[in-house]
Image: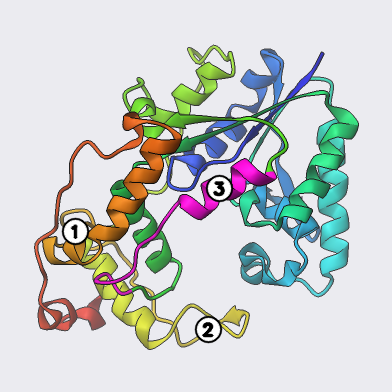
Amino acid sequence: MKKLYLHLGLAKTSSSSFQDTCLANKEELLSQGFYYPSFTLENNQSIQIANHSHPINSIYAKNPEDVLFNIQHQTDNLAKRNQHYLEELQAALHYDENLILSGEGILALEQKEITELFKLFREFYVDIEVFALVRPPYAFHCSGFVTHVYSGIFLNPATAWISQIKTIKKAIESIPYEINFFSFNAAITESKGPVNFLLKRLGIDTSNINFLFSNEGMSNEYVRVQNILNLRNSLIKDGKINPKNQQLNKNLQGEKFLLTKQEFENCQSKYKYECNFMVDKFGQDFLDDQINFSTPLPFDELMINYNEWI
């Protein structure tokens, strides 16, 4: 009996690398009885969409025009796009092999929208396995901070805290199956990292897999300069790309982004709350091994040459 494997991320756990690797090794996976579909735009079949939350969220979200992928890839006929996506999803569900779907953004859907999605899944599959990796609190915050800034959003590093608690609670409450949560700490000890960790747990022989790695981290200096530019003009304004937003055209060299010691101390109560939640839900293996800090960078030092970087 064929089985549906649904990968929910979570965010900042090498999900893009997992998706890109699965798509690049589509034939190898098929030879082992697993199908990883790609989706396309209704007006551009050459774009292969490996992150399944883009089409799924567009189909099921109450306001699909607000889905970031749709903002980035505008269309004059969103209903036509979603019909195209639905036909591709149904074709994938009809496939005879075990199906792998992956989308860390699926949990952005409302609970009733997730219920509708699983209603469709159950029309084709009796056996459904849901799984996710969970990153430790501080590592998740720093990585998530970079993603927000890279996406054109301003965050105050002295006060903002990016939490996973709401997402994890929502997953547990809204997904109608028990979720296998795995520690990212354990996954990164695997040869070839989290992608290999997950594929092996699906029962896939990875000896012939060509691993792809995405989303290299941005430097501390890059993140802080871009954050200042985002404060001036965010990337998304009134549901559209803001032409005034300035993006650095290269990653500045240097240490990876971390909070300064003072920034961390400002957020320490939030961090401790997150740690207590992780231990209560999953255990000590889901905590940070250590906490490191970045060197403070004066505002003037950050901005003195920023015109050269945009």
Q: Amino acid at mark 3?
A: Lys
Instruction: Assess whether residue 169 is covered by the magenta stretch.
Output: yes
Q: Is residue 307 magenta?
A: no
Q: CA distance from mark 1 to mark 3?
A: 37 Å
Vertical placement of residue 6 versus 146, above or below: above
Instruction: Give the mark nearest the N terminus, 2 or 3.
Output: 3
Residue position marked by numbered label 2 in the rendering: 242
* Contact check, label 1 and label 3, Cβ < 8 Å: no
Front one among 117 and 159: 159
Q: Residue at x 73, y 71 (%)?
A: 65
Secondary structure beneath label 2: loop
Q: In terms of sequence position, does the residue under pointer 2 or pointer 1 come before the other?
A: 2
How packed is label 2: few (under 14 Cα within 10 Å), some, or many (20 or more)? some
Residue highlighted by disc 1: 253
Residue at position x 10%, y 77% in the image: 298
Give how far across and how far down residue 13 sits, in percent.
43, 41
Residue with the mark numbered 3: 169
**SS at badge 1:** loop
Q: CA distance from mark 2 to mark 3?
A: 33 Å
Q: Image point 68% across, 41% down: which residue?
A: 175
Q: Which residues are magenta?
A: 156-174
Give the left or right position of residue 284, taking residue 51 as reference: left
